[in-house]
Image (cartoon, rainbow, N blue to C red):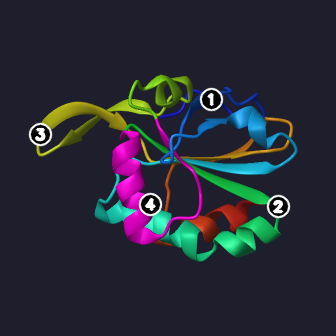
């Protein structure tokens, strides 16, 4: 899984979100960021996770958190996903895989006896100084936001 460790500086990134807006991790200096990596837009687990963050978004904002989702899908796919499920937070398009590789979540996976490269579902909680406070590698897709709150 992730080669990054809690207490290390989170790799900065700059990429486009579902609206074509350029987003950088450094834009959120001073805020705690829930940076969650997920395999694919509009699949059952990824939808459950995104909708859980959506449903708890206002309370997360109220506690000072900013939610950012990242997958290797493109902006167009993210826009459809955002629209279909009314997602209120940025979904970063990482089609060139720079961010998933920097965070160590682009890994070999296997399904039905075949191995392939894909994104390991992982959540990073990054403090206002850009330091990784917590890494969640076993994400409960239906309770992802509560999982975060239970750790902090």
Cα gap from disc 1 to disc 3, whole angstroms:
28 Å
Q: Quadrant of residue 58?
A: bottom right
Q: Which residue is mark 4?
A: 82
x, y percent for residue 25: 70, 36
Assess disc 1: are there few (<14), some (14-19) or many (≥20) residues with their C-alpha within 10 Å of its C-alpha: some
Q: Earlier in the sequence, mark 1 or mark 4?
A: 1
Q: Is residue 75 magenta?
A: yes
Q: Which residue is mark 2?
A: 64
Q: Earlier in the sequence, mark 4 or mark 2?
A: 2
Q: Earlier in the sequence, mark 1 or mark 2?
A: 1
Q: Which residue is mark 3?
A: 113
Cα gap from disc 1 to disc 2, whole angstroms:
24 Å
Q: Earlier in the sequence, mark 1 or mark 3?
A: 1
Residue in the foreground of this view, choosing between 148 and 82: 82
Single out the mark in the foreground, 4 or 3.
4
Q: Which residue is mark 1?
A: 4
Quadrant including the C terminus: bottom right
Residue placed at 42% from the left, 64% from the top?
A: 83
Cα gap from disc 1 to disc 4, whole angstroms:
29 Å
Part of the protein shown in magenta: 73-93
Q: Is residue 75 visible?
A: yes
């Amino acid at each position: 899984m992730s080669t990054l460790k809690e207490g290390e500086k989170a790799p900065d990134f700059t990429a486009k979100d579902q609206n074509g807006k350029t987003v950088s991790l450094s834009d959120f200096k001073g805020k705690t960021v829930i940076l969650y990596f997920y395999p694919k837009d509009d699949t059952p687990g990824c939808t459950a996770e995104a909708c859980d963050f959506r449903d708890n978004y206002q309370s997360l904002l109220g506690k000072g958190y900013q939610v950012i989702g990242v997958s290797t899908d493109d902006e167009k796919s993210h826009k459809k996903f955002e629209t279909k499920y009314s997602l209120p937070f940025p979904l970063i398009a990482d089609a060139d895989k720079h961010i998933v590789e920097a965070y160590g979540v682009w890994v070999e996976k296997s399904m039905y006896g075949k191995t392939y490269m894909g994104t390991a579902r992982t959540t990073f909680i990054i403090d206002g100084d850009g330091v990784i406070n917590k890494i969640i590698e076993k994400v409960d897709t239906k309770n992802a936001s509560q999982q975060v709150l239970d750790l902090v």
